[in-house]
Image (tube, coloured by chain):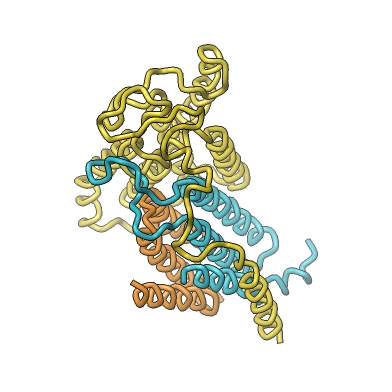
Amino acid sequence: MVYYISIALIGVGIYGLISQKNLFKHLVSLSIIDTGVNIFLISIGYVEGKEAPIYSIFTPTANFVDPLPQALVLTAIVIGVGILALGAVLVVRVKEKYGTLNVEEMKDVRR
Amino acid sequence: MRKFLSMLLALGVVFVLIEMIEPIPAYGKVDLSKRVSEKYVSKSVSGFREEVAYKKSKNLEEGSANVVTSIVVNYRGFDTLGEVTVLFISAFGVGLISSGLKRKGYGRKPNFILRTAVGVVLPLIILFGVYIFVHGHLTPGGGFPGGTILSIGILLLYLSNEEYELSEKSKVLEGTSGSLFVIIGLLGIAFSGAFLANFLPTGVIGNLFSAGIVPIIYIVIGFKVGAELSTIVADLHKEG
Amino acid sequence: MMVVTILVGALMITAGIFAIETKRLLDSFIALSVLSLVSVFLFIMMKAPDVAITEAAIGAGLTTAVLILALRKIGGDEE
């Protein structure tokens, strides 16, 4: 079931966030957690046998899946890319100031 | 040692999450008449109950054929204002932290195939992006993927030309679109008494000119998101 | 449909684990792009076309571009 796929993705993301030392890998793990949560939110609203929520020639009267989680996830995806852009620029600035991207070596550099 | 402990922690979180999904109904067997989205689908939040049919119903409470668009722009339009603000803060932060004055090139002359193909394909990309957000109330899509496709066209221009720089007019476009969104909301107060109320007449469901202010807001959002993401791409190309 | 869902889920988890464990950063970003692109298939299967178009444009397009440009700005992928 799709619930278990999204929970496994959240678990993989948390493992990557704690065990890796490079700062870019932290950004990649946060993006994996983001994708997992979005899949989980949409899978709550799925009804078997119904169609996509758009009035058209093929569905002239209402026979739709739940449209409310889709509206919330639309916002969440765009905010995810905004956070990623800000995080990437911050990592570039950390490298310029400390000289390294390894979290363990950064503790010894006093600048 | 570190990897083993972090794997234990991740497995613990996964077990807690699997125990927590028990009260949710099974995948695909949801009863929609107990949820609030049934009022959004039949467009009857204020108690106006009539069967909605494609190209037949006139002057409904909310006349866009795409139900997700009607939720994002009309019924929950205040959250879209919050999201546009978050994107603005993120683009503002990128412009503030990244340093540089002039364009950083790629170091080699771009390929002949790339230069010729971008000259053919770029107007089609911009036309496609504008089509997606103009028809946001009829077909899937809307303002946000349309703006993203516009900014991907600008990225192609950066890849295929060594001296191209995004002009300062994109910042003017972004600021104008953002304030236009708030001004349309204030016009809703002036005409109907509530912020972001729909004050234009909603026509027949399914026509291009229908649904009141929803296409106008999506055009404004499309240009704003396109200009913002193009500014982020341009700021990552600077050095000096 | 159940077999295809299980295959897609296994592909996504494999791409996620590869994106974390590999040593070169460029391979990690491309695996993240593959993960976003395969999740578009799950969104289509759950009848959500708006979300599928947005995730395909942003997840597989702009995320990869921003990460690779930031990597180029710090001077590449030296060890």
Which x, y percent locates residue B188? 52, 18
Please state the horizontal and vertical placement of residue C18, each as a whole percent of the image.
Answer: 49, 78
User: Is residue C35 among what the camera can see?
Assistant: yes
Q: Measuring 44% from the left and 42% from the top, which residue is drawn there?
A: B230
In terms of depth relative to the viewer, which is nearer, C9 or A1? Answer: A1
Q: Quadrant of residue C56?
A: bottom left
Q: Quadrant of residue C10?
A: bottom left
Left or right of residue A15, residue B43 in this image: left
Q: Position of residue B123 (x, y in %)?
A: 24, 40
Q: Residue C59 at what x, y percent from top left?
A: 44, 57
Q: Residue at x 58, y 69 (%)?
A: A10
Q: Quadrant of residue B49?
A: top left
- The colour one sees for chain C in the rendered image is orange
Q: At x 80% / y 65%, what residue is drawn?
A: A110
Q: Is residue B223 above or below residue C17?
A: above
Q: Which chain is yellow?
A: B
The residue most toward the top is B190
Q: How many marks?
A: 0
